[in-house]
Image (spheres, rainbow, N blue to C red):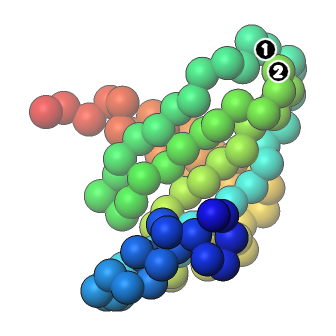
Amino acid sequence: GDGANSTVRKAVEDSKKFEKKYDQTAVVATLHFAEETENQTAWQRFLPSGPIALLPLSDGSSSLVWSTSPSHAQSLLELPEDSFVDAVNSAFSESTNRQT
């Protein structure tokens, strides 16, 4: 059965548990575009500090998830809105312009 007595739940509870700490904090925001567009593609980039992703919500907005160090996350949260948008745009453009 499902719920508290499910076999999957019991198997997970009985399995060996472990915890690993990552020096990461996620900045999550809803971004609203200046103009509506066909917003049907999710974007993700893997940066040295952690991944950043834009997930479409509607033609006019996306959800942002930016995993980074706690100190960088704090500095992002303290930015004025236009500087925050610049930081997001820069994070996506830097990773696409990087040479391999």
User: Is 45 rendered above or below residue 72?
Assistant: above
Q: Which residue is mark 1?
A: 37
Q: Amino acid at mark 2?
A: Asp
Q: Position of residue 7 (x, y in %)?
A: 49, 69
Q: Amino acid at mark 1?
A: Thr
Residue contact at pointers 1 and 2, CB within 8 angstroms: yes
Q: With 77 as the anchor, is 19 left or right in this view?
A: left
Q: Which residue is mark 2?
A: 59
Q: Position of residue 48 (x, y in %)?
A: 30, 58
Number of disc labels? 2
Q: Which mark is residue 26?
A: none
What distance separates the C-alpha of mark 1 from that of mark 2? 5 Å
Q: Residue furthest left?
A: 100
The residue that appears at 32% across and 30% down in the rendered structure is: 97
Foreground residue, 78 or 36? Answer: 36
User: Is 5 rendered above or below residue 51?
Assistant: below
Q: Position of residue 81 (x, y in %)?
A: 79, 56
Residue 21 shows in the view: no
Give the quadrant of residue 100. Answer: top left
Give the quadrant of residue 13. Answer: bottom left
The residue that appears at 83% across and 27% down in the rendered structure is: 58
Q: Position of residue 9 (x, y in %)?
A: 52, 73
The residue that appears at 35% across and 47% down in the rendered structure is: 46
